[in-house]
Image (cartoon, rainbow, N blue to C red):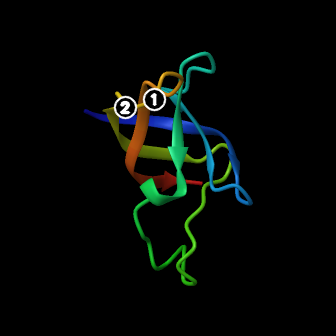
Amino acid sequence: MKRQGIVKWYKEDKGYGRIMLDGEDENHVFVHFSSILPDTSRFSDGFRFLKQGQKVSFELVENPSSTDQRQVAENVIIISD
């Protein structure tokens, strides 16, 4: 399911963060750097990261192997800074 959200926080040194679904602070999902789609204009060195406040588009995917991360963001695309 394709969704939009706003990056709540992202730790570059750890490579993960949270995205607020539809901009709602209480409703957020986990995102890992490996789920961010490559964008050569933004990530020339190959490292992918997000910044707090960015608007993103992503697929919301069920994660049955985890008890605390039931849903995760996949195929994340930055819409705007």
Give the tally of numbered discs: 2
Mark 2 surroundings: few (<14), some (14-19) or many (≥20) residues within 10 A? few
What x and y, as percent, mark residue 50? Answer: 61, 55
Residue 63, label in figure:
2
Q: Which residue is mark 1?
A: 66
Task: Specify the amino acid type for callout 1.
Answer: Ser
What x and y, as percent, mark residue 74? Answer: 37, 46
Q: Residue furthest left?
A: 1
Which of the pair 57/30 is nearer the observer? 30
Q: Quadrant of the C terminus?
A: bottom right
Up/down of 54 relative to 23, above or below = below
Identity of the residue drawn at 34% across and 27% down: 64
Up/down of 50 relative to 57, above or below = below
What x and y, as percent, mark residue 10? Answer: 68, 47
Q: Quadrant of the N terminus?
A: top left
What x and y, as percent, mark residue 80? Answer: 52, 53
